[in-house]
Image (cartoon, rainbow, N blue to C red):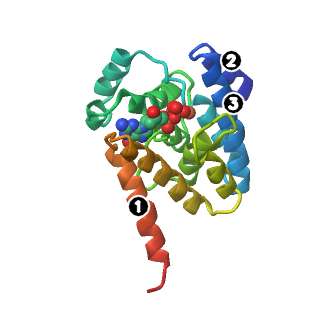
Amino acid sequence: MERDELLAAIKDRMPEKRYIHTIGVTDTAIKLAKQFGEDPKKAEVAAILHDSCKYADRNWMKQIIIEQQMDPTLLQYHHELWHGPVGAYIAKTKFNVTDEDVLNAIRFHTTGRIGQSNLEKIVYIADMIEPNRKFPGVDDLRKASEELTLHDLMIKCITHSISFLINKYQPIFPDSFECYNDLLLQKKGQVKE
Ligand code: DGI
Ligand code: FE
Ligand code: FE
């Protein structure tokens, strides 16, 4: 499916504000993909579909997680974490997305994970820094997006997310910690000691 067709299909699944966020994420993801030498078409599809299940019924999502044998740990954590994995399932079954990298970018856009691809990083970052986002520190992240490597930018973004949750005494999903550790360990591997 093409951009306009996909956008029309997701528009009914969310309030206006979320649709505007989705367009912001899409444009930012395309820009980052071009900047970091990744496929802008893949970034576009993943970004358009990333929040398609943000407003899906909680019990229905729970059922999909169980039926599709997704990570059962998800059910122990906040239901906010379910719309990524369930969104990837809908991307595959309803929107006929077959590219595993695109599906993973949707699946892990909220938490990140160990061994993220560049496309996964791009969608995670675009979701945080798109122009409609307003939170303390977002301008610093936007500025960093013009200066840092994709790897260092991802470190900065996931550090911000984890710190934010820790400051609110929220549990952190294991994939997020694993993502953070993995990024830092990879970096350490590059440094000569
Ligand atoms: O869907 P968006 O709002 O565009 O952004 P998102 O998919 O990154 O979801 C953000 C929400 O998910 C936000 O309320 C924080 C929450 N979240 C992200 N990672 C974790 C988390 N909540 C918990 N409890 N644990 C996490 O690891
Ligand atoms: Fe999301
Ligand atoms: Fe989002």
Residue under the point 32% across and 33% down: 70
Q: What is the three-letter code of the residue carrying label 1? A: Asp
Q: Earlier in the sequence, mark 1 or mark 2?
A: 2
Ligand 3 quadrant? top right
| Relative to 34, 115 lies left or right | left
- Of residues 162 and 154, which is closer to you in this image? 162
The alpha-carbon separation of the residues under discs 1 and 2 comes to 37 Å
Q: Which residue is mark 2?
A: 8
SS class of the residue under badge 1? Answer: helix
User: Residue 176: in sight, yes or no?
Assistant: yes
The alpha-carbon separation of the residues under discs 2 and 3 comes to 12 Å
Q: Position of residue 140 (x, y in %)?
A: 64, 53
Q: Position of residue 156 (x, y in %)?
A: 53, 57
The residue carrying pointer 3 sits among few (fewer than 14), some (14 to 19) or many (20 or more) residues within 10 Å by Cα, namely some
Q: Which residue is mark 1?
A: 182
The residue carrying pointer 2 sits among few (fewer than 14), some (14 to 19) or many (20 or more) residues within 10 Å by Cα, namely few
Q: Which residue is mark 3?
A: 23
Q: Position of residue 79 (x, y in %)?
A: 36, 27
